[in-house]
Image (cartoon, coloured by chain):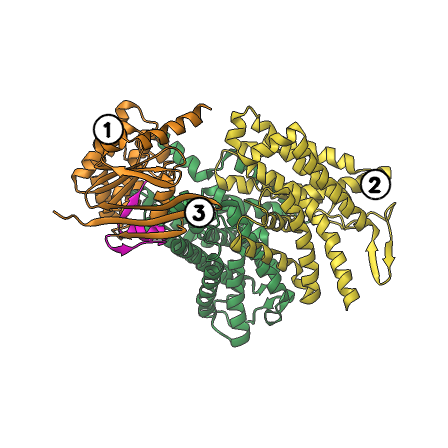
Amino acid sequence: MNKAICLDVKGMTKWFGGLAANQDIDFFIEEGEIVSIIGPNGAGKSTLFNCITGFYKPSSGKVSFFGRDIYRMRADKICKLGIARTFQVVQVISDMTVLENVVTGALLRFSTIGPATDKAIEILAFTGLIDKKSFLGTELTIADKKRLEVSMALATQPRLLMLDESMAGLTPVELRQIIDLIKKIRSQGMTLVIVEHVMEAVMEISDRVIVLNTGKKIMEGAPKEVCSSPEVIQAYLGDKYRVVC
Amino acid sequence: MPEQLLQQIVNGLLIGFMYSLIAIGLTLIWGVMNIVNFAHGEFLMIGMFTSFWLFTMYGLDPLFSIPICFLLLFLMGMFIYRFIVSKVMKGPMLAQLVVTFGIGIFLSNLAVYLWTPDFRLIPPTILQGTWEFGELNLSIPKTVASIGSIITSLCLFLFLRKSKTGKAILATEMDREAALLMGINTERINSLSFGIGAALVGVAGAFLSTYYYIYPQVGGLFGLIAFSIVALGGFGSIEGAFIAGILVGLAQTLGGFFFDPAYKYAIVFMIYLITIWIRPQGLLGW
Amino acid sequence: MKNLSPKTITVGLVVLALLLIFPMVVTQIFPLQIMILVFMYAMLGVAWNIMGGYAGMFSFGQAAFFGIGAYTSSFLLMTFHVNPWIGLIAGGVVAALVAAAIGYPCSNLRGHYFAIASIAFAEIVRVHFNNWTLMNAAEGISLPMLDESFVNFMFHTSKVPYYYIMLAFLILALIVCYFVATSKMGYYFRAIKESHDVAEVLGVNVVRYRLVAIMISAFLSAMAGTFYAQYVLYIDPESVMLLAISVQIVLLSMLGGAGSVMGPVIGAAVLIPIAEVTRVWLGHRGTGVDMLIYGFLITIISVYQPQGVWGLLSRIGNRIK
């Protein structure tokens, strides 16, 4: 069966002054896939996310979403077309309740509060935050904040969900919960791209893995393949040596 | 015409150096703790009155009251930071904005209450008269103030680059978290920077008092202009503020010369708006 | 935003009824004048709150919109004998257009940067009006005397009609604010206040929604400006475009509670009488005591009660619950 191409990235390049944070990156995502992007710190994963979702203006390249050109499009328009994302540093609206946060997301597809609230409650039930719907954004634990951020992203009713390190800094139990949530989201037919450091999670949920290092794509393949690749081990070990120094 | 133009350029430079001195204190405070000191103009006013009263009561020449202004404003700045500003640093953004407005209104009206709203002038003392170079007139007090501004800015620059405390201030300005991790007491750095920022504008006040009217509301306009300069130079950039001060002084006098003097301050604010529109990080900001 | 509870509606109606009979019970001029000022500043506060309290754009230049409203209607009346009610709408439209023109380039500015930009903008406007001969420059505009009538928006024998008109304006502003706060717009404004990133990631067109907030705010502020012109019958840049007015507006909104519908009304009800009474009692010799107290108050409020009276009340309310 031939699946539709959800996201197609070609020659993505982003310069910060004289530094190429992304250099000529090509990849595509099929509808319904979960693809992980991994790589050591500073490999350009978040930059790539930001360039695709319109938070940075890429220097050159091509991005299309279900055949539609979204290169250098404004972030809110890209969101409207159906790409939702979360941030590495979690972003929620701190003086709103959990429910209001998700309603704000749902309002992208509804013009009035009533139906948006219904949708938001449905999503909170799905993500397991419904019991905390009256909490303020600031009153949540980091794990719940990340879960809230995912809920907000889902509320915009995307066709592609991009998660930027949703598992960093979680306890093993919390990690289990978020992995289960991602699987649950996937089972609904969502396409996902995730940036992740937690390798066991990457191995468990990904269909494919893309490896970045120093701004370039160095490898792409099934999780097992990637894990045993000498080039990837080299990239990570190099990183570790740097940390030790 | 060319002589007049030259004279305007000189005037612009002279006022510009004064602006630079006023603005570097503001940019230091802004850069280190990300707080806009809307009372900065009123600090200037306090400096001017200090110099005025020292002269009136003890016959002390404004030039000699500079160290006293420096010390007094330094202590005042530390005090205000410790007991007022530090308390709103963790509060809502709006409170951070409004609090220094309150301090400014309080100070200027305290001055009205104590010393009436009258305009005062220190009679010419050591510094008086003008140097004449052909058609060109160079006011001596203004020239001395300009030299003072350069020297003071240079001292600040060296202090920040060479001394341990200065380096700690710069480090805090660049990255507060990292500075904290390196064992820098950022709270102490904050109050110190606030004190130094106030002290610098106190020095500016002493210089300004040698040739400018002294009255309680004098700070308002200078304060506003200082904001534009800081924005133009790049928030937190000392060198930027120094250069921008000169540019603004020139723009103001030349704008007044070529267009309409009534609009000279409007031109300054226009520069601010255009700067943050085209280059939000300012001339020397990152 | 929760729906209005029956209790809230009852309290609101009682307060409204009291306000409606106030001029019949109290006939002295001074309290009536204070009440009119309270309403006017409350309206300006509500207008500020829409862009400041909800959308997080802390404007310190609202006096520009207030002044533009006052000048537009007064100029139209003086020069073309345009009815002040039409001038009211015209003033609102002009202010909203100016707001859009200045708001657009400023659409990435936040926090301090926006605040200072708003001051710079308002100062440019003030300087310009001080030199604009078409607008009588610094001399100001004395409004031509018209017959006393509602249609002419002018009353000479009594201030009571002004009282009711201003009250009606304030209620209109509150309705607008309530509508904004409880609609999609209000949610989006609050997202923008949190951060532009979080708003954009939820699909909010930040530039457009910020412009909408600024324009609504400018329109309402300009309405208050036209009211002021019709009420005082004389305007000049120093009476309608001063930075002090802008600061007053921000302050009372913060005192009452920014980001709540009624906050600015509470703030105005507390601050304006204090300001007026101290001004009349203490300020007559130009001693500065009134402003001294005022500055002290601002400082104390920012340090100890930055969430405003409304924040305090709702915290107490939550504790009781």
Q: Residue at x 66, y 54 (%)?
A: B248
Please say whether residue C101 is one of the residues in the magenta stretch: no
Q: What is the number of the mark on residue A15?
A: 3
**Crowd tier of the residue under label 2, counting other residues whose Cα lies within 10 Å: few below 14, some 14–19, many 20 or above:** some
- Which range of residues does the magenta coloring cover? A66-86
Q: Which residue is mark 2?
A: B55
Left or right, C282 with respect to C150, comes to: right
Residues indicated by labels 2 and 1 sit on the same polypeptide chain: no
Q: Measure the alpha-carbon separation of dots 3 and 2.
A: 59 Å
Quadrant occupied by the N terminus of chain C: top left
**Crowd tier of the residue under label 1, counting other residues whose Cα lies within 10 Å: few below 14, some 14–19, many 20 or above:** some
The tint of chain A in the picture is orange
Chain identifier, colour yellow: B
**Please, which chain is the residue tagged with disc 2 on?**
B
Q: Examine the rendered structure and indicate whether residue C97 appears above or below residue B80.
A: below
Q: What is the number of the mark on residue A177?
A: 1
Residue B191 visible in the current orientation: no
Left or right, B262 with respect to C69, comes to: right
Q: Residue at x 28, y 53 (%)?
A: A64
Image coordinates of residue C125 in percent, x first then y, are: 57, 61
Residue B195 visible in the current orientation: yes
**Please, which chain is the residue tagged with disc 3 on?**
A
The tint of chain C in the picture is green
**Crowd tier of the residue under label 3, counting other residues whose Cα lies within 10 Å: few below 14, some 14–19, many 20 or above:** some
Image coordinates of residue C245 in percent, x first then y, are: 56, 52
Q: Measure the alpha-carbon separation of dots 1 and 3.
A: 37 Å
Image coordinates of residue A113 in percent, x first then y, are: 27, 48
Mark 1: secondary structure: helix
**Identity of the residue furthest to the front in this view:** A230
